[in-house]
Image (cartoon, rainbow, N blue to C red):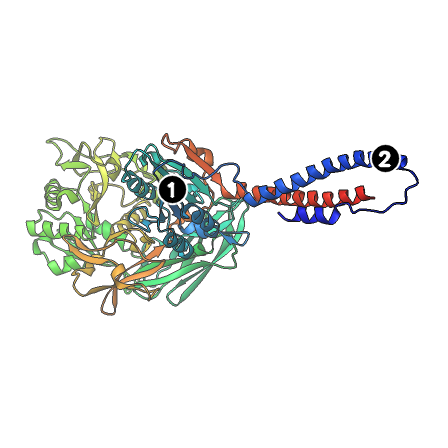
Amino acid sequence: MTMPFIIHWLTKPRPTRLPLSTVKFVQEVVKQRRARNRLRDWIILLLRAAAIGLFAFVIARPLSGNRAPAAIEGQAQTVKIVLLDISHSMGAVANGIETLDRARPMAVRHIDYRPGTQANLILCAATARPVFDRPSTNAVALVDEVSRVKPLPQRLQVQSALNSAAEMLSRVGGDKVRRELIVISDFQRSNWVAADFSVLPADTVIELESVAPTETPSNLAIMRVAPQGRVERGRPFRLEVEIGNFSPTPRQVAAEVTIGEHQFRLQGTCTAGGNSVLVTEATLNTDGWQSGEARLVGIEDGLAGDNRRALVVQVHPQPRYLMLTRQSAEARPSSSYFLERAISPKSVTNLKDQQRIVRLDPSRTDREAITSADLLILDHPGKLSDDTVELICALMLRGRGVLYVAAEPIDATNLKLMAKAAGSSLQLPVEFSPPSAGQVRKNLFLTDIKNRQMPFSVFGEDATAIVAPLRFGGGLASRRIEGALLDDVCATYNDQSACLVVTACGAGSLAVLNAELGASNLPASPAFVPLMGELISHLLGRDRSQETMSSGEPVAVFLPPEAVPAAGLKIEARSDSTVESDTLGELHEENVGVMWQAGAAGSPGVYEVRRGNDTVYSMAATIPAEEADLMPLSSDLITNRLSGGRDVKYRSALDTEEPRDDFWSLLAVVCLGCVFAEFVGLKLFRC
């Protein structure tokens, strides 16, 4: 402010001695200089006033455009809740700056102390974590929390965060209390598309501060890595790596997958803006649970954390089958003979590789043999005892698969006993009954098949043409049960009775093939072996190695049946030894098995349930795949459709702050220009 006065002192006129010949000429000169000085004074005054005004304007730096809500004078209290997004996408880097680093100064500006204002900070990812239980004036602690926080490998649970803020704001009472909610996020569309602001108090002032980059960073990510189907020791299997390409151009990618001591490399092209699956054939020669990791090689993108993904593979020994049947192994042809040949083709000559099938007469039940089997097959079993029915149902509830070929009237009774023993865990979509008197079931054909579902999906688009020549005989009548899940009926005969039913029973499955195979042409059809193979593969149990848990989210999963009892089991983190043991969850023994429960899954990696040195179950914690898509949601969609009738103000920090900085810089330059023009003007008028 002293600069104009210094310039005025340096340039003020100095007295000058002049020789005078006459006073008349002096008076004329004085009049001329007075007019000139009056012009000079006005010009200098305007320049000086402009310089001082601009200088004061630059120092004040008043906010322009969309302002953040501020406390209103005269109100008793302002309560402000700041939601800060710290999910995985906030770790994206654009122009060398992490998105969360852009959010920090904005959060500090909103929680900084102001008279009559209380504030709180809620850090949002898989869970909403408030810094304080209620709004506080302790701005120092809030600012300190903002400086320490880092992005978490979790997805943003938007509604949970909004509900937490709504609960906190609703506890604030008083007519003169102003409620404010500030949300600082990249507003990733995969998270925010289902947001609902209507849970907030009606008078809440809502301000959304977007820190998403002007141009969405390109990103590649491993969305899924898993084997296809059941992995058995020494047999090749299909290993798939699904890669998401969230960029406008196709990308050549290479992925390396490590499983135990084995390493596999996959290469291919990922289409722009979509997912592509890279496939390779792999073989593992060791039984049990094996862990590993898939990673992208030579990739630089906006989000490095999703370029790696942990995986688990369960390698099974050759499955053991138990067939409960009254038919003799020497009876050929017979229904049980056809099933045995479909499951274990004669082309398999190596006895070590041949799948093991044990026949057992149901009248001489061997509990140990039934319990040790991986799959139970019932074909012409006759009347089952109550103990056998209860044992079979108990095994199904714990994860076993059962294939029942219903060919005789007594089979309807057995199925009713099984439904009763399993209780609510077994909900058959139809009720089977013996054919009515005089009804002959023969020459039946299929009129309705679920060709996109297992097992007919194995035939692809040719499913309808392949099953058209099939003719069936025997079996039971059936009646649809009202309210049952009809999708469990995979195929229907032309008389509207069910041909194939596949339904869940606890952790296991029950498949009912309603036909007498000896009176059908299915065994002679080329469709028989692949159809039974697909069905058997499903009944052997879903591939537990494809199960993953999302980091930071609740875990509730039943362990395999062999994990019983829970005593002696321990949960360990294989990939992160620093994880606290009390955060890994607990194991509870339930009626149907051992359940692993945890309030929140740990950081990405592999976690194991062990008994001594043996692993009985393993699961990978991963970053949710949707976090890889960094595209923000449209501001119009947020402020209109998702606002819930609230007045929602949306502001992009990058769009408004950068032009404002340029504006203030321009004002500073003009201010200096006015000072320089004043100095030049004074010099010129002295000449």
- In percent of width and height, residue 281 lies at 42, 58
Residue pointed to by mark 1: 460
Q: Amino acid at mark 2?
A: Gln
Query: Which callout, 1 or 2, points at the residue further toward the start of the chain?
Result: 2
Q: Residues within 10 Å of mark 2 (few under 14, many from 20)?
A: few
Q: Which residue: 41% across, 63% down?
A: 258
Q: Visible in this render: residue 652?
A: yes
Q: Nearer the viewer, residue 486 or 148?
A: 148
Identify the residue at horizontal 34%, vertical 66% (top origin). 285
* Residue 672 placement (x, y as % from top left): 67, 46
- 208 shown above or below 561: above
Is 585 positioned to the left or the right of 439 in the image?
right
> Do the CB atoms of the residues marked 1 and 2 lie less than 8 Å apart?
no
Tell me the SS state at disc 2. helix
Q: Check the picture and name the quadrant holding the C terminus.
A: top right
**In the image shown, does 181 or 135 lie closer to the viewer?**
135
* Residue reaching furthest to the bottom: 613
Q: Amino acid at mark 1?
A: Gly
Quarter of the rendering containing residue 660: top right
Residue 195 lies, with reference to residue 302, above or below; the image says above
Residue identified by numbered label 2: 27
- Left or right: 125 in relation to 536: right
- How far across and how far down the image is residue 527, in percent? 32, 44
Answer with left or right where residue 201 lies relative to residue 276.
Answer: left
Of labels 1 and 2, the one closer to you: 2
Q: Provide residue 467's location: percent of width, then percent of height.
A: 32, 38
